[in-house]
Image (spheres, coloured by chain):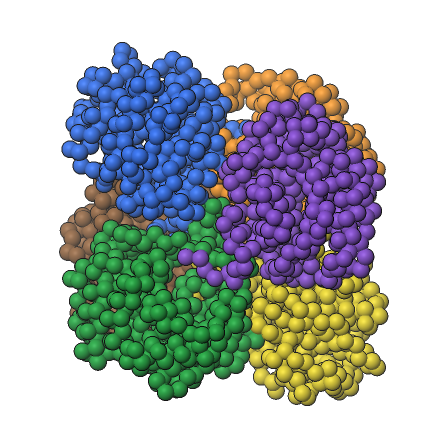
Chain colours: A green, B purple, C yellow, D orange, E blue, F brown
Amino acid sequence: MPRVITFGELMLRLAPEGYGRFTDSPKFLATFGGAEANVAVSLANFNIDAAFVTKLPANDIGQAAINSMRRFGVDISKIKRGGPRIGIYYLEKGASQRASKVIYDRAGASIALASPDDFDWDNIFDGADWFHFTGITPALGGNLPEICETACKIAKNKGIKISCDLNYRKNLWSRETAGEVMGRLMKYINLCIANEEDADDVFGIKADDTDISGGKLSHDGYKSVAKQLAERFGIDKVAITLRGSISASDNNWAGMLYDGQEFYFSKNYAVHIVDRVGGGDSFGAGLIYSSLAGKSPQDALEFAVAASCLKHTIEGDFNLVSVDEVIKLSGGDGSGRVQR
Amino acid sequence: MPRVITFGELMLRLAPEGYGRFTDSPKFLATFGGAEANVAVSLANFNIDAAFVTKLPANDIGQAAINSMRRFGVDISKIKRGGPRIGIYYLEKGASQRASKVIYDRAGASIALASPDDFDWDNIFDGADWFHFTGITPALGGNLPEICETACKIAKNKGIKISCDLNYRKNLWSRETAGEVMGRLMKYINLCIANEEDADDVFGIKADDTDISGGKLSHDGYKSVAKQLAERFGIDKVAITLRGSISASDNNWAGMLYDGQEFYFSKNYAVHIVDRVGGGDSFGAGLIYSSLAGKSPQDALEFAVAASCLKHTIEGDFNLVSVDEVIKLSGGDGSGRVQR
Amino acid sequence: MPRVITFGELMLRLAPEGYGRFTDSPKFLATFGGAEANVAVSLANFNIDAAFVTKLPANDIGQAAINSMRRFGVDISKIKRGGPRIGIYYLEKGASQRASKVIYDRAGASIALASPDDFDWDNIFDGADWFHFTGITPALGGNLPEICETACKIAKNKGIKISCDLNYRKNLWSRETAGEVMGRLMKYINLCIANEEDADDVFGIKADDTDISGGKLSHDGYKSVAKQLAERFGIDKVAITLRGSISASDNNWAGMLYDGQEFYFSKNYAVHIVDRVGGGDSFGAGLIYSSLAGKSPQDALEFAVAASCLKHTIEGDFNLVSVDEVIKLSGGDGSGRVQR
Amino acid sequence: MPRVITFGELMLRLAPEGYGRFTDSPKFLATFGGAEANVAVSLANFNIDAAFVTKLPANDIGQAAINSMRRFGVDISKIKRGGPRIGIYYLEKGASQRASKVIYDRAGASIALASPDDFDWDNIFDGADWFHFTGITPALGGNLPEICETACKIAKNKGIKISCDLNYRKNLWSRETAGEVMGRLMKYINLCIANEEDADDVFGIKADDTDISGGKLSHDGYKSVAKQLAERFGIDKVAITLRGSISASDNNWAGMLYDGQEFYFSKNYAVHIVDRVGGGDSFGAGLIYSSLAGKSPQDALEFAVAASCLKHTIEGDFNLVSVDEVIKLSGGDGSGRVQR
Amino acid sequence: MPRVITFGELMLRLAPEGYGRFTDSPKFLATFGGAEANVAVSLANFNIDAAFVTKLPANDIGQAAINSMRRFGVDISKIKRGGPRIGIYYLEKGASQRASKVIYDRAGASIALASPDDFDWDNIFDGADWFHFTGITPALGGNLPEICETACKIAKNKGIKISCDLNYRKNLWSRETAGEVMGRLMKYINLCIANEEDADDVFGIKADDTDISGGKLSHDGYKSVAKQLAERFGIDKVAITLRGSISASDNNWAGMLYDGQEFYFSKNYAVHIVDRVGGGDSFGAGLIYSSLAGKSPQDALEFAVAASCLKHTIEGDFNLVSVDEVIKLSGGDGSGRVQR
Amino acid sequence: MPRVITFGELMLRLAPEGYGRFTDSPKFLATFGGAEANVAVSLANFNIDAAFVTKLPANDIGQAAINSMRRFGVDISKIKRGGPRIGIYYLEKGASQRASKVIYDRAGASIALASPDDFDWDNIFDGADWFHFTGITPALGGNLPEICETACKIAKNKGIKISCDLNYRKNLWSRETAGEVMGRLMKYINLCIANEEDADDVFGIKADDTDISGGKLSHDGYKSVAKQLAERFGIDKVAITLRGSISASDNNWAGMLYDGQEFYFSKNYAVHIVDRVGGGDSFGAGLIYSSLAGKSPQDALEFAVAASCLKHTIEGDFNLVSVDEVIKLSGGDGSGRVQR
């Protein structure tokens, strides 16, 4: 069983029940999530030995966060306990023309205040095959850019493959800082995951002729972005998620993979959305799984897109689907007929 | 901050959870609503100084009704307490081909038994800029037709603009009585809101070539209805909501505004419905807000239609959206992408 | 009021709330259902004197099962109490590309272990006009094939009409056993209900040129299946449900009826699904009702399809709709406009 | 199986979840209840053939009310459908020093507006052994006093035993009217159920030396009340419930029975309350069951007190306990040890 | 209607449903609370014109916090919007021997980072009769000690009465800092509320011979504490709450008031607890109400103790009881009999 | 960190919400539990390396069961997957005089049908310090008595300490079979846990002068039982739980430990019950923890009783408390004061 390490923030996610608005909701569904944690849980559900690294407060809320991942078999033994608090994000689910809304309350979280000494990367990477993080982790500031770079270096030295999802968050850092920091980290990356906006926001890499809101996607534009990313930083593979937002309830969902030579496009799914948060993360998990499983580029991409298509039908950040379920969908059965 | 007075009934709304049927539901969601109350709450959410006038029993259920509006900043100081009971409506939410069902239990409500002495309109209208009611208020019978007429007269004398949504309810009165009473009140009205059926039901004003159930709407038919309404009663502006009912889950939604000279048609929204009750009321609130904000006819209409489009995505009678959210949608972003 | 007897298993249905997955759900909605029980409840809601026959354990869970049917007016006085347990099925509701999942735990249920002495068919059929069961009942094994045959014989002797839904369940028996047992029972049947897969699975009867998963249905294929069924077993009428599975959220739904002479096809409904379990059962109930009401073949079919279309909008196995609601829809109003 | 007819109002009961207050509760538990309906359900749970007579509106809320009783096996075939509405009562559950609160909204209910023609008592009483109503039924006004008297006369003529719970409700009628009407009905009564306050409120019959709020109860006082009641109206048996209210969470509960010769006192139960509404009704049902079962006075009383003790531990108006459970408690096992 | 200003932090309160533990709870009840906000809401429920002053972020969670108080009629127009976040506290409700648990996450809240310019006290105190804050507000640090002192000075100058609840929180500041800051503020205080521990923790004032955990309270000890407090700081009145903790489910609750001359002790309540958070705050609100209403010391104390007794029976921080309900209890009716 | 292996059945527990009865409950709380699983979870919460051994079906319900234990850190890697189904128990929570009710549906469970080959005890016991099972495991029948004996032998050979809770279940086997099988296993046992009934039911060992239902417990009786058990089977230590059942809501709870020389009695706790299922299991876990931690007999007993006292305040089978919480209570603080 291959071993994957992911590193980032795990937040408490507070969401009104159903389609309730923040200003009128007496209950919050309390789950946990975060880009890299979501990848770890998805991988554990694929029966990968996935470990998640973060720092969480040594109180019961920190413990609840750990329990939420341990439930699905993620190795949580590398999590550092301490610091003042767990970060929070509030999620209000949208519908039809009303967009989902996210309010972040992550400043001062234990992970954001972590020190380099909190993580013994030699120990953490012992026995690992893959390392994954996203642009959010260094964006948390403090020592995180440095910690990420240290982790990348040590992983590289140990021959561990590294993947990174650009995941630009404008609330966390400026385009300038992001470009500078991520630019430094890119050289360690084997697999880069992005969407068109990320590449532009972080590195000023632009595609032509695409209109994301209108739901129309230009294949050539995506090819151009992927190629620029791969060439500028010497990355092996670049994957891009293609989301066509019709409304908060209905999206088109597909992906593209560039392996340095060819461009692969997946089939497209018309998704009726239950919860789209974590869609990109589940795509990343699908790619990592596929890579470790030695799938062909086209198969790897189809697996990742099918996996993340299914994520859109599941409440919460975590993608709770098995390899069998993904393969069944990527193999063509999206009819939704009852499985008895 | 302009001040708007609305007058009507506030009912307890009892709805099975989810898609439960009345005959098999152990819990009711207990909210409150009513055509004019809904307008007041929507206006308060637009930061308008909105006051709601009604009569509610002096018990805890009456107080709960008041609290539900006060929560959103509606001025409830003009509400009269007393009388025997609060009216109720039971709502069973439909889905797909199954229609939503409403059962009214509003007879004998405190407001329906109100006396002219219960409302001191001189005091109530002090400092007000706009007065709004709907055809439901006089339809409640008793002294309500007289009270409405008194209110209209006093408002008119004070130079307050008056809007009325025809809102014909066949359970409350006959077409004949409605035509007679509403005919008397129309002469005070500056802005009349209706749908095609209302104009026909109340005043026998018909449009041609339209098939509402089939989802096809004839623009010329609506123009004809609006023009007849405006001319017969000397109304400044007539607005008509254009609903294309595909199913209980999916509707088309648009509007038309006639300002005595031109006919304006809004863009159409394909809405995936969370809760359509109060859709027309939120359209009215949007128009009142737009008028007070001095928007152009086309902008006013687009604002009202976008506001009421969003209402369809929110549980309960009340439209809990801000001006910013409406403007974002009317400005073209209905893609439902997550707002972070 | 005509009297209908249905015979089969009633199971406890355990379903995570909303779209929750089995592996992450702290609560199960606890309802009851089973093919023949669902028919009985639907008929009771059509004001038919419907009695359900089964065997249930003499404990409080068995009582709860009984209560769930008695609530809707089903005559439960013929239910035998005893045996070890009630069967269970776990249902995870799918969405979009994620299929619904059913896990059966019905082995060792009281009904599966029933003895011929448990049911006094002479008494049970006293005053009855119709008898209905499905292929699931004999598939439960043990004495059930024999019990079903006894019931059919006695019903036939009393001049009671008999309907059977093939309902092949591969988890319960092999195609061979099913073909052998059902072949023996078919000769008593007046009305056979099936879908294309059933006829093939049980009797090897195939249609051409159809692709069920792709949502395209060939009318000629269905005609061929129905005719073969009718002719091989001398059945008066054969009805086939036509489901086009677009996804777990959206299906097309229609039906066909063959009365030995003509083939009737219903209109098609594009259904946005709340709960599709029991869809076929509600179709059967619609046909039985229509037959007892003396409707023409086309009307009978349209009633059955409209009834089962509505079932898809209701949570749980049971179809909680009235004759009026079905007629309104079959009469053409599927617009979902609010019924006040 | 003996047959019991009960006659009265069935109301929709709306209660905030848990200990929520009316003014801050987004959901109401929606159950149904009413003094005589509660007796019928309790008797059905004792396997008595219990029929409930009332008038309910011919809408889905009326149907839901019927379903709620049919679920437990009550014969609802004698219920008249029609009239405008179902009565409602709002219940806020108290705790510790905070009292439970009931708000009635029962004016204008279908039963309150019933006409004598709505009930064919000859038919209703066909095959009946016992008739039960309470002082609430005539208190509803309109034709109810007359209807009750008619029912009593016909029952008496048919040799049916009659029981009545005085159940004085000051919101429904004055002491004077109550005394006058109930005085007329008392002469038909075989078993009268009351508490000390009832006898005083309705007939001015007083006991000495008792302090109900303080939790101290004088046996002699109760004897005196029972004897006066029996003698004044020629009643066979008088039963009195003895409630010692320590707080909204803890009560003492016992009863007394006078059979015209002896006074019997039950053991006392210290009850930790889940829901005390319907406690008196379940006592009545226990007495009726015991009488029909031919129990001795002491046993009958112990059964009724144990049954109603258990009612205090069950949510809702209805007493959902079996004869076995009652006998187990009255036999001395109140230890609450797990029954496996 | 007298006007009261309270000043402090309003937090989001996140509590598992029922008796759920933090480490195993999928939902949090989301309400709002804080010592001074609780006082304001309680006063508003007593029909006092209560305004609450704080700083809340200009996002939807801040708005939800405001709505939660506006619902009950608190004047929220003086609340400053801005800053990064709302403070949070997590509450796990205890039972029997398991204590309730509170985890604070209030660092970096908008109010804690407020600047003196955020509050225009001249304007805020316009028309006010009373000012209330607790030791928690200055304990938040930053500019809060200074802001509190400014507020006290201006209030004093305007002749406004000032009350303060010591409310020592060891997580927020040391005993030394607390003693120093609170010592400075005490000289403005007319009414000081405390418990024995507070006086010791903040000022080193000790009583003798008391054992709080053991449930035994020495009257003389409390007298000594109150007298020391009053004399050291020249305070008019000192009130002390007397809690006897038997378990997390059962407490004794009483109070003492010292008016500079006499010591008054209230009756004691044996409370079966629903939610004890906010008990002290509701005691303070009761005293403020009583003072404004001109009650005698004994009556004022009994009112405050009865009000806070009732608070223990209500979920959430806020005391949702009316003056009538308090007076009924303080007048002696704690029997919990149903109020119809 | 010491390692403990527990072996037994893990069942799905289905319980109506709140105090709902089976016959009237639309939802079941779905948790998992079983005597030995409960011990493992409790130990994991004490930071013991606890592994649970069982056999569960290879479907999603089996996976959910595993997840429920993995969440709390139990090592689930030794669980065998396969077989037909998971056992179920239905739990209806009692209150006051109404007893809790358990309905078992465990026949045919995967574990009950397990074969000796399913468990490789050499591997399972690798690195283990303690082995625990209860009388329920062999009572499941089939190969379980043999499997238990094999496990005991291998554990004994490896020098692993063995504890066993007698846990007699009359539904699973007769006293005779129990006595025979348990008698054979007893010789491997170091620590035997029982209650007075168990010892009598399984081995005919009786105590005198005790009345369990009446809440009075004779110390001498328990001493006699413990001594007889220890002597007959050569057991090192015998522990007995002392439950005084006042009602389903209130129990007294204490324990006794006999170490072959002295008898130790714990303090008694008056418990207000949230959920008493698993109380005995949490006592066992407390004793195992204490033994591994080298506590003195009195301290070990006090720890076990305090731990299991706390279990009664937590919903579900699992005892979710930490060592710190137990020590705080056993150290004397049962006042339930809020922990901030």
At 31% across and 34% down in the image, what residue appears? E117
Q: Measured along the vertical axis of the image, is residue E131 above or below residue F206?
A: above
Q: Position of residue D153 (x, y in %)?
A: 80, 32
Name the one closer to the observer, C138 or C301: C301
Q: Position of residue D274 (x, y in %)?
A: 49, 40
Name the one closer to the observer, A4 or D192: A4
In the picture, which quadrant includes the N terminus of chain C?
A: bottom right
Q: Position of residue D162 (x, y in %)?
A: 72, 34
At 68% across and 80% down in the image, what residue appears? C217
At 59% across and 19% down in the image, what residue appears? D224
Name the one closer to the observer, D267 or E98: E98
Q: Position of residue E189 (x, y in %)?
A: 28, 21
Q: Is residue D277 visible?
A: no
Q: Is residue E148 left or right of residue A323?
A: left
At 54% across and 20% down in the image, what residue appears? D220
Q: What is the total number of numbered labels drawn onto the structure image?
A: 0
